Image: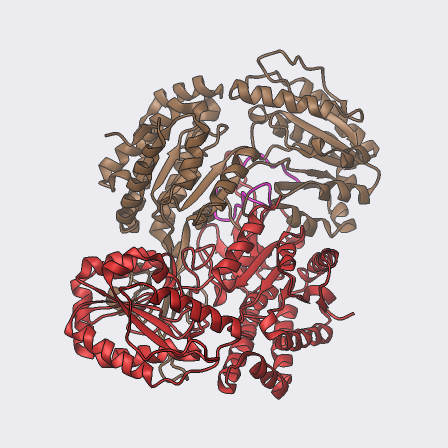
Chain colours: A brown, B red
Amino acid sequence: MSLSNSITSLPEIDQIMDQSMQSFLAYKKVSAIERAAFLERIAFEIEALGEELIKTTKEETNLPEARLLGERGRTTMQLRMFASMLLEGSWVEASIDHAIPDKVPAKPDIRKMLVPVGPVVVFGASNFPYAYSTAGGDTASALASGCSVVVKAHPAHLRTSTLIAAAIEKAIDFCKMPKHCFQHVTGTSFEIGKALVQQSNTSAVGFTGSFTGGRALYDYASVRNKPIPVFSEMGSTNPVLLLQDALLQNAETIATQYAGSITLGVGQFCTNPGLIIGIQSVGLNRFKATLSNAINQVAPAKMLHVGILKAYETKLSKVLANAGVTPLTNEIAFDADIASPMIVHVQGIDFLKDENLKEEVFGPYAIIVECTDMDELKAVWNSVSGQLTTSIMGSDKDFEANPELIELATQIAGRVLLNGVPTGVEVCASMVHGGPYPATTDSRFTAVGLNAVKRWVRPVCYQNCPDHLLPEALKETNPFKIKRMIDGNPYQ
Amino acid sequence: MSLSNSITSLPEIDQIMDQSMQSFLAYKKVSAIERAAFLERIAFEIEALGEELIKTTKEETNLPEARLLGERGRTTMQLRMFASMLLEGSWVEASIDHAIPDKVPAKPDIRKMLVPVGPVVVFGASNFPYAYSTAGGDTASALASGCSVVVKAHPAHLRTSTLIAAAIEKAIDFCKMPKHCFQHVTGTSFEIGKALVQQSNTSAVGFTGSFTGGRALYDYASVRNKPIPVFSEMGSTNPVLLLQDALLQNAETIATQYAGSITLGVGQFCTNPGLIIGIQSVGLNRFKATLSNAINQVAPAKMLHVGILKAYETKLSKVLANAGVTPLTNEIAFDADIASPMIVHVQGIDFLKDENLKEEVFGPYAIIVECTDMDELKAVWNSVSGQLTTSIMGSDKDFEANPELIELATQIAGRVLLNGVPTGVEVCASMVHGGPYPATTDSRFTAVGLNAVKRWVRPVCYQNCPDHLLPEALKETNPFKIKRMIDGNPYQ
């Protein structure tokens, strides 16, 4: 039997999640070294899919080959990063407090480490058919942690997802992993997602996509008899502040940089800078002119699928319905099958009054909010909800004049950028791809980078456990030579 | 105006939480050293309350003086532990990835650390009027993290709570902290708790108490427009396995040890061992005999308040309604105003059929479940929901014969004890006082020990931020000399 199942009835979900739980109980005991080899093998098998994979995804997503090659590289890199993390070992946060028998009362020997939570259900994103889908960051981090994974294939790239699932299945066979440590389910019914989240064996959920979808899964999980954590990453408008001196010095350079970021990948990134805030000035006028010109040079392009194009146009229409909103770029043909980029302009006072303008418009779009002064700029910035990123374009002089801005930025977003564009999320230990709601459903975690694994683990401590019965990470001799906290002293 | 407010109307809650948010924005900027001094000062002011505090709490809780002195010591120790943590500094999980400009695409400089989430609402426990109440572990860890705190006083020790709040207020004045970084609200209406959780400024909730209360707060938080994390610690039956060889060798010693643990503090601990599972044998009979005799020697005692006594008796009646349940200890006078300890006995097969028997009976009580063999013992163990602790009493021979038990134990509980009693929760870096639902609402965190702070913080990363604008913990020179992750290498 294949690990890829087309679901047609809800009882099948019980069977799949029961298998996932049984497999989890075996997989969690697989050594870190073997799990690392398994992740490496998944990367190898994905690469071995070769041209067929790229060709299939190109057909399904309209994404160009160069982008897909890059994203495939990112995906295999993530798998290898988690493999390295497993081999290095400190991620389990091992901590040892030795017994103090003559303390009153006697202090027992206590040792703590992180263990996997259980079967994880992953809902991938349509805009990253590799890196945030079937073998993407959620799956890679969950498999690294020792959790079993059930991926609900994204219907917009079903054939791609099935190819990747087959690659993982090959890796399972090759590495002799517990058969159902990864399963792949397909099916378009809305009820399937709900049933997967609410099945009793499901222990955590990872989701990347729309606000509506992410919030729905969160709600399904919260009303369970046994609630489970849901990490939904739901996108963002990624506000950008343009400060006065920076504009005076570099309006054209900044505009060109942002024209690229806004239209990169037809604007289909959750870190797309969709909200640009500045103070009325000559510099801002120069920025607007250069940005509009640059955007008008960008050719319209196909979006991932027709549903996303329609959503883009619907959202644009809502924005344009505001009498204070003026397009700064060429008129758009709304009946086309390709998406034209668009920049619009509004005064701060009008922006503050219209909730529609604060919503993410997923696509090659940005709204420039022109404020009368720094107070209004801050009011506009603070009026938007939690964000994945916020960026500040400022000179040394700007930051000297406004020293509070970086601190304010940390209140708004999980990632604060200075003098850069938010598109392009580096995969590394320090990355935070998360942020206050509604950017995510739990600001305490990240979906990208090493710490993504922390979503799927919980601490367990062992009290008075003989050394030979302890897990390797907690044995006195520290056989893996990992950094540990010893008697409250970090990282000995 | 005092920081202690008796709430009589819901608009007052808006005012209190608005003040908390304003204060948070100032308090989060207070340096770690000053926050540490503040926590130390709170400890000092609590000690300075002297006899009056102990006398008041004795009157309100029926807890004996020795216990209260010990608990006060634990409370001030926790405050000082978090102060030390702040001075040491590594808890912010600083991580630096240096730029690699000649990488394609160029890798930017990215630096990450933990920051406080916002105003935290704390609901303390009745059974720990100091250590898990007004200035207890939740408040101490939240203040340490940089969050402001609003404590809803427990009505069962209102005067104690008010005294402690006044001590914190003195510390605020002495240390010149933002005035409303701590606030204390009193009021008995159920609606107050709900409104505190649902007020828009509330960013996280800590709760210690009953399942009903903890789940209700979780549900209130989940249906908010902007959901927030709730860490509810809701108690446990703390299953204990008695293995064959250990009983054969030490039945009487183990029984005596457990008689003490079951009746300690009139059984009013969330780690009270309320479920003891063994296999029918001469050893188990010896254990039952010794335990019953020892328990019969324990004098009845007053519980914390009459509501807890009534709940104890109601739960006992439900247990005794099962025809398979036999009391092993003296008959109880249910109309008394003091609680008698009780041990009951049931066969595994009967236990498995009755959900009432699996519920926590908060008080000096345990049920001994006698199983026919190891398979039934495991079935009984697995039939109970997530637990704070599970204990295994076993000899080397027992663990050799059943090597899978410790692994299974980590599935059930946050703390796994070998050959000890679960009462007595050491406050240290390695402690896990948490566990799968319904022990808590999020198994990924602990309420006790250094890591309790992790409930109130979220990661933020800074991309391409000039060194002089970075927080101290992330500056290149590492002015605090904390352990950090550098370019993916842990704890340099």
Residue A148: x percent and y percent? 33, 43
Whether residue A259 can be seen here:
yes
Task: Please tell me in which quadrant of the rendered image residue A91 appears.
Answer: bottom left
Up-down: is A145 above or below A269?
Answer: below
Up-down: is B99 above or below A97?
Answer: above
B373 or A107: nearer the viewer:
B373
Q: In the image, which residues are magenta?
A: A419-440
- Residue located 63% across and 28% down the image: A361
Task: Please tell me in which quadrant of the rendered image residue B204 appears.
Answer: bottom right
A290 or B26: nearer the viewer:
B26
Q: Main secondary structure of the magenta part?
A: loop
Up-down: is A247 above or below B187?
Answer: above
Quarter the N terminus of chain B occupies: bottom right
State left or right for residue B381 relative to residue B387: left
Count of picture labels: 0
**Residue at the outermost bottom position:** B51
Residue B404: x percent and y percent? 23, 58
- Residue located 15% across and 71% down the image: B281
Magenta stretch contains residue A438:
yes
State left or right for residue A413 relative to residue B440: right
Residue B98: x percent and y percent? 53, 48
Magenta stretch contains residue A412:
no
State left or right for residue A449 relative to residue B20: left
A432 or B246: nearer the viewer:
B246
Residue A49: x percent and y percent? 32, 25
- Residue located 45% across and 40% down the image: A206
Whether residue A426 can be seen here:
no
State left or right for residue A235 relative to residue A182: right
Task: Please tell me in which quadrant of the rendered image residue B384 appears.
Answer: bottom left
